[in-house]
Image (cartoon, coloured by chain):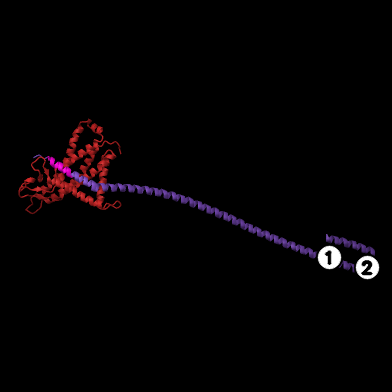
Amino acid sequence: MPQHPFLFSGHWYRVDLVTVAWTLIAGLILIIVSAVVVRKLDMRSPRGLQNWLEWAIEFTQKMSRDMMPSAAGARFVLPFAFITMAYLFVANWLGLIFTWEFEPGSDIPSLGLKAHVKYSLLNSPTENMNMALALAILVWLVSHAYGLRHPLKWLKQYRNPMAIIDEITNPLTHGMRLFGNILAGEVLIEALLRMPMLFGWVPTGLPLLIIWLLYSAFVSTIQAYIFALLLTLYVGHKDFNVDHH
Amino acid sequence: MTIVEPGTMIVSLVAFLIVFFIIYKVSYKPLSNMMEQRRQHIENEITTAEQGRAEAERILAEQRKLLEEARRTANEIMETARARAEKQAQDIVEAAQAEAARLLEEGRQLIERERAEALNEVLEQVAALSVELTTKLLRNHVSEPVHEEMLKEAQKNLGELVS
């Protein structure tokens, strides 16, 4: 696992600075790109990135219509699913583009840094289990908040006690799946980069690295999609509106 | 050191929420509004196009009907005009024939009258000449009884001629 600098290191409430920073940077990238698209929004002849964004929205729209039991629920979940998917796509790709290592040289106790330890300053935020779990918990909270619009029906779903187990395993697997896939990709990239060179100059790891990068890119994209898909599914489980569309 | 870090969890969740709401406000809302607007626009356009087509079809049918009517009227007018022209021609021919017949009749009557007049004149002359001739002849040869008989015959002949 890559080492990260922490705020309040040593305390139980320590904060992983790299994760938080790249959470914000991934968002910033998405905000800037989409703001540029929105500024040149054209209803009649969409161009370039606007097509991509529209395609993504329509894709999410179709997905949420398929997964949600009611039209109102589909409308509710669409922005959540779309923004989360777009965000995760950017965030998952971040760690693949380049790595950035840092060796302090001397101890920096306020950030918990020790000299002569290599710290990774660039990782996908989703590579951190806590961030991924936080997203899953957010989905869990949103789904229950939505379900509690119909409290009686919400209560009725627990006539089968197995549903309570679902409430624990669903967010857990939801977050872990994302975290595990991304972490595996980045850890292996790091390992391949550290592979010793043959005779000191033949990069034996390079072909493997390229294959693994392509595969990780695929996995990153798929995981963003799967996370959004499960998000609509979980919110859909708590959608007790009755208008079947 | 535990793996679960509530601090990281909460801070990254807050960061994500901030990013989420900025994206929602800055990008998602205008984009989805635009798409909704476009959807409505296209719907309107389709409705308008359908209405326009129905209207065009209606007008076309109307035009066709009008054209048909106009053609029929034109035919009727032509037919009437032809009938009238034929009748007129016939009238003219008839009138001409009648005029010709009248002229012929008049000419014939004139000839007849002239002939009658001429005949009358000749008769008068013949009567006068025969009277004169008879008078000349009778002075020499006729006795009283013969004279009378001849007068009677002459009267009878004249009567025949005059009647």
Q: Name the residue that disc number 1 marks.
A: B124
Where is residue B104 drawn, in percent x and y?
A: 71, 61
Q: How many marks?
A: 2
Residue B21 in which image quadrant: top left
Can you name the residue that lies furthest to the right here? B144
The kind of residue on which mark 1 rests is Glu
Front residue of B145/A74: it is A74
Q: Name the residue that disc number 2 marks.
A: B141
Identify the subunit bearing mark 1: B
The kind of residue on which mark 2 rests is His
Where is residue B157 drawn, in percent x and y?
A: 86, 61
Q: Are marks 2 and 1 on the same chain?
A: yes
Chain B tint in image: purple
Point out the frontmost of discs 2 and 1: 1
Q: Name the secondary structure under disc 2.
A: helix
Residue A125 in which image quadrant: top left
